[in-house]
Amino acid sequence: MVGSECVHSDPRSPAALGLVRALGYALAMRDLKDEQLMQDYASGSMQAFEELYTRYRLPLYRYFRRQAPDEATANDLYQGCWEKVIAARRRYRPAAPFRAWLFRIAHNHAMDFHRARKPGASDPLEGVPDGKPGPEELLDGAAQGQRLLAALAALPPEQKDAILLRFESGLGLEDIGKLTGVARETVKSRLRYATQKMKQALSK
Amino acid sequence: MSTHDQDKLEQELDELQRQYRAAARDEPPTLLDQAVLNRARRAAERHAIRPWSFSWMHATATAALVVLGLAVVMQVRDAPGPPEAPAALSKEPRLDYQDEQDGPDRAVDALKAFRQREAEALEDQQNAQKSELLRELREEAIRPAAPAPAAEPPVLIFRPVPAGWQRHTKADSSIAAAARVDEAASAEAVGQSQQRAAAPAGQEADADVLEFSGETRVLASAEEWLTWIIELKQAGLERAWRSELEAFGEVFPDHAVPEELLATELEDPGPAPQDP
């Protein structure tokens, strides 16, 4: 499921038959909702988890990559978040959307990481990540994106967390407020300030 | 914030999101993907080894076993014990500590009273058997001559065994002798050892109250009864064999009695010989 590897084998061999069956199962998985997949994984279905992982690996990784000061830390946060999801698979109840449940775990995991850091250490939420644009990059189209990432990295932690949740999870204001434990208007205010700062950074 | 402002914010966020998605193309390393998937697979395999249904059944079976065990334990605890035998004839009176404190005389009196009650009970039983036998014999005598049966059915005669019979029959045994010594010692402890330890068996049988061992001798005929009386006489149980002979005369008045019993029957039993 992860990564598209080209398999050259005899279509009549058992391995090929297994591959065909797995592909058919994966196609069937595509139509299932996240909540059903998570329940299937809690019942022991590894294919259900692979489908879920395929759906959420990029948003979740980007969320942590923007929160962490470096790639190694982002990798650790990303892996730790999935381990929490795996450990909590039997406690999951489909009453809540899987997306909100997953990003609640991610948000709490990131907050735990920032709280555990030493007080004197530099705040990664206010730093600039590795993708800082160089002078030549500012000349082409990618420069705009790099400036946006730099502006995002420079946001205050609460604003950055709110706008990352909005970008990566696709949740509404209400759900982000529940997820982060603040009111809907607070979320809206944070997003408005974050938007203004990023627009200012892009217009320079 | 008004709806117009909110819509404007949403439009700005969508535009920024589009630019963000275009710029942020980070992907987790393949090794990281494999690590996460392996972790998830191990967890799923553990779950497959012990599925939910199995754990549920296991817990239910365990709970049922515990409840069943508790029920059995409680039932056994609440069940009544075996019925106790009547204490009047089966047990000797308990000489508790209070009796011993009051003195050995009181304990001896209690023991005598118990044995007397036991003897009376046996005597009643014996009398009832006697009268039953007499009634049957009289009916037999009154009945007109009938063709004699081919074989006379045996008449069972139940006779109580006097106390000391076993002791006398095993007088030569060293174990019996040791037992007699032990009994004498215990009797001494309650205050009457001087008389009982020194007295021979015959004198013991001549006491005011004829003592019985609690056993019953089953005799199949008058001849066996006479043999039993002779054995009692040879054992030196004077009062016992005389009482038996008297009872025999009442039951079988016309039956011949051996000479050795007739010769001594007329004699006065007299005092029993005393040990030196």
Image (cartoon, coloured by chain):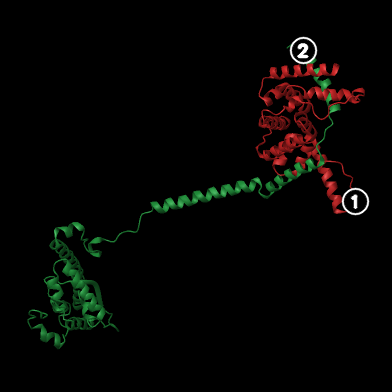
Chain colours: A red, B green
For label 1, the SS is: loop
Chain of the residue that carries numbered disc 2 in the rendered image: B
| Residue B139: mark in rendering | none
- Total label count? 2
Question: For the point 69% across and 37% down, which residue is it?
Answer: A84
Q: Name which quarter of the figure residue B218 lies in.
A: bottom left
Q: Secondary structure at mark 2?
A: helix
Residue A196's image quarter? Answer: top right
The label shown at residue B5 is: 2
Q: Position of residue B81 (x, y in %)?
A: 35, 56
Q: CA distance from mark 2 to mark 1?
A: 59 Å
- For the point 40% across and 52% down, the residue is B77
Image position, residue A178 (x, y; %)? 67, 24
From the viewer's perspective, tell me whether residue A56 is left or right of residue A8. left
Q: Is residue B175 above or below residue B62?
A: below
Relative to B233, say whether A57 is above or below: above
Amino acid type shown at disc 2? Asp
**Which one is nearer the viewer's eye here, B265 or A11?**
A11
- Mark 2 vs mark 1: same chain? no
Front-most of B3 and B28? B28
Q: Nearer the viewer, residue A198 or A170?
A: A198
Query: Would residue B59 be seen by someone viewing this image from the given angle?
Result: yes
State the image coordinates of residue B114 (x, y, percent, origin top left).
18, 64
What percent of the width, then of the height, locates residue B215? 25, 72
Q: Disc 1: which chain? A: A
